[in-house]
Image (cartoon, coloured by chain):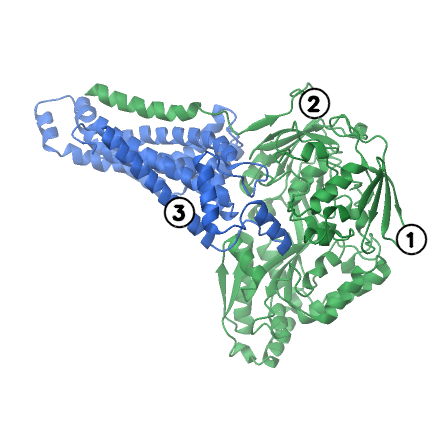
Chain colours: A blue, B green
């Protein structure tokens, strides 16, 4: 087990290192730069700005400086948001996004697993068809449509829910609903097909023949096998929902990390691009480790090597 | 077995709730000693665009953030509700007979929000800091009329050579390099605001906390919740505080057009600074709806250095084949005005009350009835240039950055050129940063462009076409034109300058390095119960004297 952990951490560090190099290279390859504006900036001022943010140095030196500071926990100054550090921006927005993403994924998990199991048990019946129609809808309709629809219906027309920020629990309803719509649908479909698979296994047939209670059969025997694909999906999903809720954050004016992620790329805010990308990489690698450990918990036959 | 399942579910729940617990929203900083909502406090909530990139007056470039800063700081002059500048921190401004030396006396009762007096030295410090290459302000060029400013920005002279000197605590002497007719307006700009050396120096983050954000205007910063809102509170140290009726103004940061409109409809804000184009028809007849000129022009650049656009006849033909009435009526839903010249409506002429546009002429007709005549003329020009009925004309590329209105405009124009002139044009959509980069460098054939004035004077627009000018994206070059603009800049006598500027515009409209499309305007919603709001010609909003009825 210790050997396993060491190996995983080693791979993780290597992955993050590679990602940092690739991000740095790509970021500097794409045209444009952080000091462009609709009204032209004089070459002298651009030069002064480059000196100020260390962008006048050769690229390898810039990379080494960034990584050195990064190892010491200093992500650098944002070029665009003057006077703010990347640390300040990421660690003030991440909790907001994490809370939102945690709730959405939890909701998606509970609803998706239940709906998927119900659909599988009632295969071919009207309940199954209804659930499949709903989940197809969930996959086909993008989150900005759901968000705008909720905003206009419950925020403006019915006047039931607040539309700005995350001050009270009521404020969470619409963003969480919008964010969990797609994953709920996806998990439902995933759960349905893997549950059908599990229900067709010999041991389930044996259990059925022995007259095991339907619920025990479902939740004790079939679920353990059926839930593995869902766990595989949920780990990265959590990481992506935390960083990728750009549209929903914009529509409901939520100060989350998703907006930073996109805006820093459009604005060519180099230190922020590096910081947010590495942050996402760390999060993903971490989630994958968590997923692997969850496998072991659910299915003792799986060996962590 | 069941235990394990339960523990797994518990683990997931715990994991998620761990995030639920952490942090308490976005970072929020509040000033000490400012009590929260006092009973009967008068407050106003208005919308702003996205999060200000900076609250440093020397570094700011955004128009909407200028609005916030105009409430927090005050320059030597300020705009009053009749759209003219009046003395503000200055008690008196004396101009020498050669129009190059300004002797400015400050008011006696002006104070910073922490109670210390505002001194002439605070202005001297702020101005020198703004032009210092170390500050790297992208707006440093606004100091262009001040002696040695350009040389300091370029790193050729020391910042102490700037033409400003605090003679004593209350007297400032400013030296210009040439007479400047709009210098009193510049004195009201954010970059010209005073700053306190002991507040700013050595603290990069002085703008981040209300505690260190010391200002001298009618309001002070009370709270800045990043990406959510900026709340201002009335400044008890402001000399004219009796005229300020509001206790707080909250600028809500709303990036999304639809979200902004939703917040307005819900009554969460009383001012909605832009609304989605498709919503405009349903609001147009309501009293909330406001449309004002924005002193800017949307246009199309032709790259004068690239074939076939090195031929003025081609540029003119393409420009004439654009049906501007269609663009205005159908694409912009009448929120902009068809442009028949380059300098937009609303810009002044010899007297501030006269309009440059009214004194000048239209260079072609933009009415729907005359469109066929324009097209006939365009066809003639195209034939003269060697492309009868568009034959032999290469396929050209129109570069733009994706935004709903930009795309719609590009497609409409593409279609007009195709059907009227037989010219094939492709649209190249480029991400904003890529687009700006290639436009600045001249790596395009045709490009979307727009320009707004920095100050209410036609030279702010026409300066664009000077050879090798920073914003001269069409790469136009004409020695005759450069000479006229140089002449304009050598005098502050508007009776001499304005005829020259009309002449300059005529040259541009003859050579057509750009095809003007529309004069910009600003469309916003203002709750009719808000009284005393006004805006200035540059499109900055003034809520400071507002009252909320009912």
Locate residue B499, reporting x and y percent. 82, 64
Position of A215 relative to B428 (above/below) = above
* Kind of element beneath mark 1: loop
**Tag on residue A21?**
3
Residue that appears at 67% across and 21% down: B34
Q: Are marks 3 and 2 on the same chain?
A: no
Answer whether residue B359 is visible to the viewer in this image: no
Where residue A17 sits, quadrant-wise, is top left
CB atoms at circles 1 and 3 under 8 Å apart?
A: no
Dot 3: chain letter: A
Image depth: mark 3 or mark 2 in front: 3
Indicate the quadrant containing the N terminus of chain B: top left, top right, bottom left or bottom right.
top left
Residue that appears at 61% across and 72% down: B317
Where residue A276 sits, quadrant-wise, is top left
**Tag on residue B97?**
1
Q: CA distance from mark 1 to mark 2?
A: 50 Å
Position of A36 relative to B69 (above/below) = below
Give neighbour class at mark 2: few <14, some 14-19, many 20+ (Cα, 10 Å).
few
* Kind of element beneath mark 3: helix
Residue that appears at 72% across and 56% down: B460
Locate residue B183, reporting x and y percent. 80, 50
Image depth: mark 1 or mark 3 in front: 3
Q: Are marks 1 and 3 on the same chain?
A: no
Residue A101 falls left or right of residue B274? left
Q: CA distance from mark 3 to mark 2?
A: 54 Å
Locate residue B433, reporting x and y percent. 53, 53
Answer whether residue B356 is visible to the viewer in this image: yes
Q: Residue B435 versus residue B270: which sits nearer the camera?
A: B435
Q: Residue B362 versus residue B110: which sits nearer the camera?
A: B110
């Amino acid at each position: 087990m210790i050997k396993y952990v060491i190996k995983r951490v080693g791979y993780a560090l290597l992955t993050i290192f590679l990602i940092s190099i690739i991000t740095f290279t790509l970021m500097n390859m794409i045209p444009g730069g952080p000091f462009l504006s609709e009204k032209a900036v004089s070459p002298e001022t651009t030069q002064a700005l480059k000196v100020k943010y260390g962008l006048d140095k050769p690229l390898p030196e810039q990379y080494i400086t960034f990584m050195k500071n990064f190892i010491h926990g200093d992500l650098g100054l944002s070029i665009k948001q003057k006077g703010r550090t990347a640390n300040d921006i990421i660690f003030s927005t991440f909790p907001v996004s994490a809370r939102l993403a945690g709730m959405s994924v939890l909701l998606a998990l509970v609803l998706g697993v239940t709906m998927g199991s119900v659909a599988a048990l009632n295969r071919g019946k009207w309940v199954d068809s209804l659930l499949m129609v709903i989940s197809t809808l969930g996959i086909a309709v993008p989150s900005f449509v759901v968000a705008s629809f909720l905003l206009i219906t419950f925020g403006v027309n019915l006047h039931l829910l607040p539309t700005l920020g995350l001050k009270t629990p009521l404020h969470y309803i619409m963003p969480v609903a919008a964010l969990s719509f797609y994953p709920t649908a996806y998990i439902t479909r995933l759960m349905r097909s893997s549950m059908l698979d599990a229900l067709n296994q010999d041991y389930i047939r044996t259990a059925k023949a022995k007259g095991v209670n339907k619920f025990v059969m479902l939740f004790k025997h079939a679920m353990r096998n059926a839930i593995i694909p869902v766990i595989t999906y949920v780990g990265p999903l959590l990481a992506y929902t935390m960083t990728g809720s750009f549209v929903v954050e914009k529509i409901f004016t939520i100060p989350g990390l998703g907006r930073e992620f996109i805006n820093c790329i459009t604005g060519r805010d180099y230190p922020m691009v590096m910081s947010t990308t590495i942050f996402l990489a760390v999060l993903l690698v971490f989630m994958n480790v968590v997923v692997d450990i969850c496998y072991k918990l659910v299915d003792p036959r799986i060996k962590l090597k | 077995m069941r235990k394990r399942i339960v523990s797994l579910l518990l683990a997931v729940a715990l994991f998620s709730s761990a995030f639920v617990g952490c942090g308490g929203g976005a970072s929020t900083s509040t000033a000490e000693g400012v009590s929260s909502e006092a009973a009967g406090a008068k407050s106003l909530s208005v919308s702003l665009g996205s999060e200000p990139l900076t609250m440093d007056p020397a570094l700011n470039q955004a128009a909407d953030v200028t609005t916030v800063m105009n409430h927090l700081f005050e320059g030597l002059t300020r705009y009053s509700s009749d759209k003219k500048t009046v003395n503000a921190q200055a008690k008196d401004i004396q101009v020498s007979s050669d129009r190059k030396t300004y002797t400015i006396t400050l008011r006696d009762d002006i104070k910073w929000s922490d109670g210390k007096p505002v001194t002439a030295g605070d202005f001297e410090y702020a101005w020198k800091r703004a032009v210092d290459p170390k500050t790297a302000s992208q707006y440093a060029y606004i100091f262009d009329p001040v002696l040695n400013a350009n040389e300091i920005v370029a790193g050729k002279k020391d910042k102490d050579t700037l033409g400003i000197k605090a003679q004593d605590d209350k007297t400032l002497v400013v030296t210009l390099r040439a007479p400047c007719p709009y210098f009193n307006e510049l004195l009201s700009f954010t970059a010209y605001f005073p700053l306190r050396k002991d507040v700013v120096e050595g603290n990069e983050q002085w703008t981040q906390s209300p505690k260190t954000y010391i200002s001298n205007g009618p309001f002070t910063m009370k709270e800045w919740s990043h990406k959510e809102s900026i709340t201002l509170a009335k400044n008890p140290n402001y000399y004219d505080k009796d005229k300020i009726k509001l206790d707080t103004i909250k600028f809500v940061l709303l990036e999304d057009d639809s979200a902004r409109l939703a917040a307005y409809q819900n009554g969460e804000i009383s001012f909605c600074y832009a609304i989605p184009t498709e919503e405009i028809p349903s609001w147009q007849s309501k009293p909330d709806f406001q449309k004002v000129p924005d002193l800017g022009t949307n246009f199309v650049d032709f790259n004068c250095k690239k074939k076939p656009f090195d031929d003025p006849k081609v540029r003119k033909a393409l420009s004439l084949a654009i049906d501007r009435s269609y663009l205005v009526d159908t694409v912009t839903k009448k929120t902009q005005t068809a442009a028949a010249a380059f300098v937009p409506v609303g810009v002044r002429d010899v007297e501030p009350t006269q309009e440059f546009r009214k004194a000048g002429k239209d260079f072609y007709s933009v009415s729907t009835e005359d469109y066929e005549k324009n097209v006939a003329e365009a066809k003639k020009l195209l034939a003269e240039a060697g492309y009868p009925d568009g034959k032999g004309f290469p396929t050209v590329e129109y570069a733009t950055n994706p935004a709903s209105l930009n795309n719609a405009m590009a497609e409409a124009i593409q279609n007009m050129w195709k059907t009227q002139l037989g010219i094939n044009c492709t649209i190249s959509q480029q991400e904003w940063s890529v687009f700006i980069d290639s436009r600045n460098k001249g790596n395009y054939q045709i490009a979307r462009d727009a320009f707004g004035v920095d100050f209410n004077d036609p030279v702010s627009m026409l300066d664009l076409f000077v050879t090798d000018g920073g914003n001269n994206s069409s790469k136009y070059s004409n020695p005759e034109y450069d000479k006229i603009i140089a002449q304009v800049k050598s005098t502050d006598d508007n009776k001499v300058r304005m005829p020259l500027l009309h002449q300059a515009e005529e040259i541009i409209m003859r050579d057509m390095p750009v095809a003007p499309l529309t004069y910009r305007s600003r469309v916003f919603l203002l709750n009719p119960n808000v009284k005393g709001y006004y805006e200035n010609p540059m499109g900055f909003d003034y809520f400071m004297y507002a009252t909320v009825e009912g």
